[in-house]
Amino acid sequence: MSFKVKDHYFKKAKKENYLARSIYKLEEIDNKYKVIPAGSRVLDLGYHPGSWIQYTAKKVGPDGQVVGIDIKHVNKKLLGLRNVKVFEKDIFDVTSVEDLGESDQFDVVVSDMAPNTTGVRSVDQLRSLNLIEQVFYHLDVFLKDGGNFVIKVFDSHDAQMFLKEQKSRFKEYNYLKPKSTRSVSKEFFVIGKGYKKSTN
């Protein structure tokens, strides 16, 4: 059964008109690692409900652009943001940026995606790792050479092993469990800067 703990960050998000408390995770990551420059183009994978889009739209400003993709219905609350486009699509069905009406790859890719959880830890970890592997596999499609990347991970031994193998694909590579993450949560974030595109 899912539940919402109405904690400090939940109340803060409500008060500041953000769509979810997860805004503060991205804000902390960006403040620490400077992953979202003004004027950049950002792709948000699994954006729903959209608090990360609210943050990135503000950060990139009028000269930047944010594109969000999710299998859930388009959140109409985001449609008023002038530098934002959102799509109801399965990200793994997208084979090129042209499928999103774009002509160029993105400066930044962020992903707060999580699988539908079962409550069975081993199953949920496996589903999460499958999502993460798919996102890393598709990075060459979406992310520019030298670009930045943020992804949520459910911790497990297999996830740690996989992530170590990906380290060489970035100039900088860090892990962070933001302060707003609930203490019981097994999630953390991987932050990659200076993406090195595959040459093959």
Image: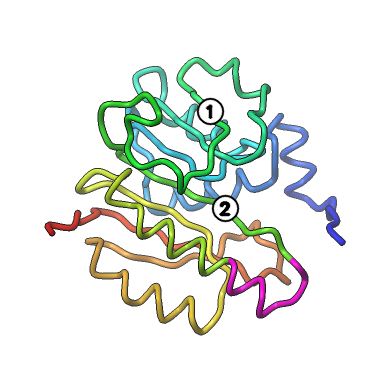
Q: Amino acid at mark 2?
A: Met
Assign the C terminus to one quadrant of the image: bottom left
Residue 32 marker? none
Q: Position of residue 10 (x, y in %)?
A: 77, 46
Label 2: which secondary element: loop
Q: Nearer the viewer, residue 104 or 112?
A: 104
Q: Position of residue 188 (x, y in %)?
A: 55, 66
Q: Is residue 197 above or below residue 142?
A: below
- Considering every residue shown, the one lying at the far bottom of the view is 157
Q: Nearer the viewer, residue 102 or 164?
A: 102
Q: Which residue is mark 1?
A: 86
| Residue in view at x 60 percent, y 47 percent | 24
| Residue in view at x 77 percent, y 71 percent | 119
Mark 1 residue crowding within 10 angstroms, few (<14) / some (14–19) / many (20+): many
| Residue in view at x 37 percent, y 46 percent | 35
Q: Which residue is mark 2?
A: 113
Q: Which residues are magenta?
A: 118-127
Q: CA distance from mark 2 to mark 1?
A: 15 Å
Q: Position of residue 174 (x, y in %)?
A: 38, 66
| Residue in view at x 72 percent, y 64 percent | 117
Q: Is residue 199 above or below residue 166?
A: above
